Amino acid sequence: MRYESSERLLRLARTLAGTRTGLTLDEMAESLGVGRRTAERLRDTLASMFPQMEFKEDDQRMRRWHLPGSALVGVIAVRAEAVAAIETSARECETRGEDDRAALLREASTTLRAVMRPDALRRSEPDIAALMEAEGVAMRPGPRPTIAKGVLPTLRRGILGMQPVVVRYDRRDAEEPATRVLCPYGILYGGSGWLVAHVDDLPEMRLWRLDRILSADLIDRGFQRREDFSLEAYAAQSFGVFQEDPVNVVLRFCPEAAEDAAAWLFHPSQTIEREMDGAVTVRFRAGGLLEMCWHLFTWGTAVTVVEPEALRAKLEMLTTALACRNNNGHR
């Protein structure tokens, strides 16, 4: 119990030093997974250990506590596990062809190594190497997009600075690339990777494949960002990345696959219901029926589409077409 309390103090110190705006007492409790009274005791203990700890009142007159990062120099060390985890994530990005993200992760790893004390780094390096060797990256089939050099940094600057970008976009159905002025809102990773943006002066949000953007240049002006837009909510409308009107989906998994299905995140809105016979019913609301079919293929006969009829019909059509093609190929 004493060790657990010390660990919580260190976690709280890291969290308070790692936030610019500080945390309220309720946010401290939520971050640590404890009650408000426990968070209050931990905060008071931390304040007695670090006189540099301070608070300010926000617009709602709530106290937000902050600890300067300089107070932790020499007190909290970078763990070998943290460096190894970043390095492993960089290798995963490289495997998927996301070289730009891999470079940013390696930069973060190098920065962490740089702030470590020389003796601590010397002791940790064998552990970092051993952990990286023990935690490999499983190979999975999938696209390896090639993103033009300089595109991602430019898009990030446009997103952060709310600046339009002019892009040359490779349309596979056209002989020449199209030139578009886009207002960028965010990037969705997974598969090929997608830019979420709308054409300048047109409010409808669209997806633009990153590997089809041949070049991107910032325009020296701003754009008015839509206040009602949420990237998280936009991504949650669909099962994957293809945007369609969301529908209610009900999937039933047989008892033999129930445990695997119950542990699987199909969609953020999902609910799971266990049946008397051991089966599991999963419900969620999303669009993207074709991508759902692609995923449901991996479950084989273990899954039954209860709703909607459109998803069941599309899955049957694709299954029949695949069987016909394979049969014709063996003739």
Image (tube, rainbow, N blue to C red):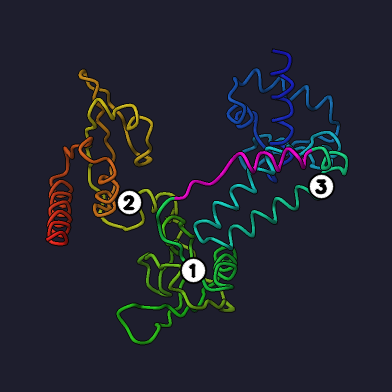
State the residue position of label 1: 146
State the residue position of label 2: 238
CA distance separating discs 3 and 1: 33 Å
**Mark 3 vs mark 1: which is more N-terminal?**
3
The amino acid type found where label 1 is placed reads: Thr
Question: Which percent across, then down, holds residue 212?
Answer: 43, 73
> Residue 69 lies in what quarter of the image?
top right
Which of discs 2 and 1 lies nearer the camera? The answer is: 1
Q: Pointer 2: residues within 10 angstroms few (<14), some, or many (20+)? A: many
The answer to whether residue 160 is above or below residue 180 is above
Helix, strand or loop for disc 2: loop
**Mark 2 vs mark 3: which is more N-terminal?**
3
Question: Magenta segment, which residues?
Answer: 124-139
Whether residue 174 sits left or right of residue 68 in the image: it is: left
> Residue 269 lies in what quarter of the image?
top left
> Residue 63 lies in what quarter of the image?
top right
The answer to whether residue 117 is above or below residue 202 is above
The amino acid type found where label 2 is placed reads: Ser
> Which of 175/202 is in front?
175
Q: Which quadrant: the C terminus? A: bottom left
Helix, strand or loop for disc 1: loop
Q: Is residue 304 magenta?
A: no
